[in-house]
Image: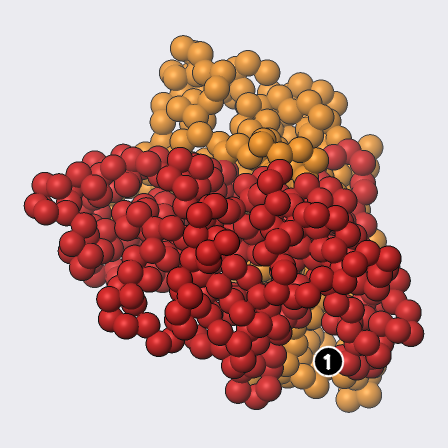
Amino acid sequence: MTALLELKDVSKTFAGGKVALENLSLAIDAEQPRFIAVVGESGSGKTTLARLLLGMIEPTQGEVRYGGDDLSRLSGVRRRAFRREVQAVFQDPYEVYNPFYRVDHVLRTPVRKFRLATSQAAGQDLIETALRSVGLRPEEILGRYPHQLSGGQRQRIMVARALLLRPRLIVADEPVSMVDASLRATILGSLRRMHEEMRISILYITHDLATAYQVADSIIVLYRAGVVEAGAVEQVVRAPRHPYTQLLIGSIPRVSTERNWVGEQRQPDRSVTASGCRFVSRCPAMTERCVGEAPSLYRVSADHAVACFLQQESAEMPNHELSEVLTQPA
Amino acid sequence: MSEPILRVDRLRVAYHHPRGAVRAVDEVSFSLRPHERFGLAGESGSGKSTMALAILRMIKPPGRIEGGEVWLEDTRLSGIDDAAIRRLRLAGIAMVPQGSMNSLNPVVRIREQIADALSDHGLHPGRRDLAARITALLGQVGLPPEVALKYPHELSGGMKQRACIAIAICLRPKVIIADEPTSALDVVVQRQVMETLGRVQADLGAAIILVGHDMGLMAQFVDRLGIMYAGRLVEVAPIDEIITAPHHPYTRLLIDSLPSLEHRGGLRGIPGLAPLLRDLPSGCAFHPRCPLVTERCRTEKPAVREIGPDATVACHLA
């Protein structure tokens, strides 16, 4: 497998000693496009992961590689290629716009900078096609200022902008957490369609396990800077093995007449120190061993890995093999 | 059936705009029974937060309450003076705001913020009394006593929201209005905060209005649910009935737009966009998005009708 973008044993520690991400390896295949969700609560390291992949921050340890080259040392030409092939969609559809420019600006700039079109008319065509493919009507969008559009429209323009560049990977960091539930489906649907029709890999970063289950093929659950569970969505969401994933799924309120909203049974014990499992202070199944020792990943099936001693019957899996459980054919 | 604790009768709120008035709440009526958990759900811009503010008479210009009445037991809220409504807020009806991060004063310790709330209502307990009272309040929302000495930035999101609940209940209100109290929290913390809110409500014997858009949260928490669309309350029914057999097509779509955890491939949105309040469609405001639209819906605005002992709907087809 050749990797388009790859994290190799990456850790990120911020000033002050906060460990945001610990020893993560993840490869985005160059040939086989994937739709991978990264799920976790705030502080789990999911935005740090996005920023590392986009080259916005550098790892404290390990390497981020783009087509085999260290991302922080790319030549001008390669850096340009990276900037085109790897696109981002961020959480806040308000902050990414300059309020003094019409929204056309965020669409025209990449066309010009990357010389995507040979003429004005061709550029305009490209922009209109991109807008239509995310379900927007160009005549209702172009020429407007950001404040004249809804949050959902603005977020779809950001997806259209990413699309213009014909990227191979889109890193979408909480793209729908600020839009209404009724619009989430439309935006996530466009990402899914781009993945299927244009063979673009998507890394969908979210705190919302339910939408991740709906659109992604595989999923990584992060908890306090590390992977606790990963694999095919059907495995992780329908048959979760890690107590944290189980807690996460049980905490989602369901539309049902059954009041089955279960949550944490045990009060977190803050006194337990962190030399062991990262979840030990909250785990209902913790043992002595979990306090002193951190579990490695165990591969419970071809497309499912869990970092928990409860799975120690299964074979241990080195961290750098994480991508293997994410790329099994469904 | 017991007398309602809160009664909202044909309430109307408009925001004045150079291009004409915008009707944010349009003839909304409902009542809240003692101890009841009532939900108000809808998309952004449906008027649900404006409703919450209007009940407390907290609408600021260019917004204005144009008509209708709100009764808290025997008190008509539009009939009392500003000083009286100020006393009634917190003591009679308390609000747990959206986004606790922004509603706590960042440079004041939690202890002083609770003491402020008390002294604003003429309560000045002695030092020891005050400390005991604050400890008890924090205990009620599941916070340790040392939180009293902390500043908001020293607390997690869930703890801040609990601190807001502690302030809201410090005068033992009869009605608690919680406006999306958990929208900024993770699901695990959300459940803990909602459990706390439910527990203090039961302790106090208060009724609660939960404003939000998450139908899952509503299904798990409230007794009765009202659905708002374009400023109108388009359906009200006991929670079990409304989720198993909704009468309004919009309610159905709202329920279906929640992503399932049971089977994949069912991610559906609601077609179209929420209407602009200053430019509402003719007839039923939902008709351009409605899958069951008929000719009549385009021209005639459906009235709110009673369809069951505890249920109303505003739809020609129901």
Residue at (75, 31) in percent of width and height: B240
Q: What color does chain A have in the rendering? A: red
The N terminus of chain B, quarter of image: top right
Q: Nearer the viewer, residue A324 or A117?
A: A324
Q: Nearer the viewer, residue A82 or A16?
A: A82
| Residue A296 location, quadrant | bottom right
Residue at (61, 65) in percent of width and height: A320
Q: What color does chain B have in the rendering? A: orange
| Residue A135 location, quadrant | top left
Q: Which residue is mark 1?
A: B147
| Residue B311 location, quadrant | top right
Q: Is residue B193 above or below residue B52?
A: below
Residue at (38, 75) in percent of width and height: A72
Task: Tell whether B62 sits left or right of A219.
Answer: left
Q: Is residue B276 above or below residue A240?
A: above
Task: Tell whether A102 sits left or right of B296.
Answer: left
Give how far across and how far down residue B73 sits, in percent.
71, 46
Q: Nearer the viewer, residue B169 or A80?
A: A80
Residue at (21, 47) in percent of width and height: A144
| Element under disc 1 | helix
Give how far across and how far down residue A185 sits, in percent.
49, 38
Which residue is the extreme one toward the right? A288
Give how far across and how far down residue B15 sits, in percent.
38, 47
